[in-house]
Image: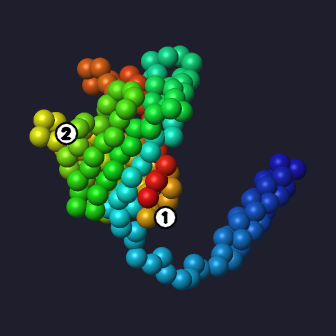
């Protein structure tokens, strides 16, 4: 009886393996072309206005994200604006809130083809931010993350979300 059960179990396993192989063999082959990659510099070029500002405390056991937009957006003054130019210069317009982006200068990516970081260069400092995603020329949203650390350990993540003005 035990031998018969082993044969049935082996037979069942073989049938399942055959069915799995048959389903995988029936996948259609992808066709078409992906086209040229998007120009990352052209995607960043333009004026971006802050739409939200959040903070995540990485040391908190709750791991909540707090909306701190009111530090920059009050409905009366123009929110923080960043302008990135095609010649790789940038400027900032800030009426309210703390300036995390310097006074203007030049900008770039860590890698122009596959950027992960936005780098802002001034005569005094180099600021590096994580990109929440790469924007294309027709995208209307940009997310920039500033990660604060203490002694090499990340403590807070500030996320600036912007809308494209032009």
Residue that label 2 marks: 126
Residue 146 in picture, x, y percent from top left: 36, 34
Picture disc at residue 26: none
Q: Residue lying furthest front in this view?
A: 76
Circle 2 crowding by C-alpha within 10 Å: few under 14, some 14–19, many from 20: some
Q: Residue at x 83, y 58 (%)?
A: 8
Q: Which residue is rendered at x = 44% and y = 62% of the image? A: 136
Under circle 2, the secondary element is strand
Extreme residue in the right direction: 1
Query: Is residue 13 found left or right of 151 in the rendered image?
Result: right
The x and y percentages for residue 13 are 74, 59
Secondary structure of the residue carrying tag 1 is: loop
Q: Which residue is label 1 attached to? A: 138
Residue positioned 83% across, 52% down in the render: 5
**Nearer the observer, 1 or 102:** 102
Name above or below for residue 99 compared with residue 113. above
Q: Residue at x 27, y 40 (%)?
A: 128
Q: Residues within 10 Å of mark 1 (few under 14, many from 20)?
A: few
Q: In the figure, is residue 123 to the left or right of 68? A: left
In the image shown, does 50 or 155 lie closer to the viewer? 50
Q: Is residue 143 visible?
A: no
Q: Relative to residue 38, is residue 152 depicted above or below?
A: above
Q: Nearer the viewer, residue 81 or 141?
A: 81
Q: Position of residue 50 (x, y in %)?
A: 46, 41
Give the mark, 2 or 1, whose residue is nearer the N terminus: 2
Q: CA distance from mark 2 to mark 1?
A: 28 Å
As drawn, the residue found furthest toward the bottom would be: 32
In this rendering, does residue 47 appear at all?
A: yes
Q: What colouring method underlies this structural image?
A: rainbow
Q: Are marks 2 and 1 in contact (CB under 8 Å)?
A: no
Image quadrant holding the C terminus, namely bottom left
Residue 138 in percent (x, y) is at: 49, 64
């Amino acid at each position: 009886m035990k031998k018969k059960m082993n044969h049935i179990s082996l037979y069942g396993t073989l049938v399942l393996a055959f069915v799995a192989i048959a389903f995988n063999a029936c996948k259609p082959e992808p066709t078409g072309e992906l086209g040229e990659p998007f120009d990352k510099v052209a995607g960043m070029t333009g004026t971006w206005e802050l739409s939200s500002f959040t903070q995540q405390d990485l040391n908190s056991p709750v791991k909540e994200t707090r909306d701190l937009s009111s530090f920059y957006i009050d409905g009366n003054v123009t929110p923080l604006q960043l302008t990135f130019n095609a010649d790789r210069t940038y400027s900032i317009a800030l009426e309210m809130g703390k300036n995390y982006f310097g006074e203007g200068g030049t900008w770039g990516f860590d890698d122009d083809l596959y950027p992960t970081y936005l780098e802002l260069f001034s005569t005094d400092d180099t600021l590096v931010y994580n990109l929440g995603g790469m924007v294309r020329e027709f995208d209307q949203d940009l997310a920039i993350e500033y990660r604060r650390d203490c002694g090499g350990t990340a403590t807070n993540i500030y996320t600036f979300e912007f809308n494209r003005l032009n």
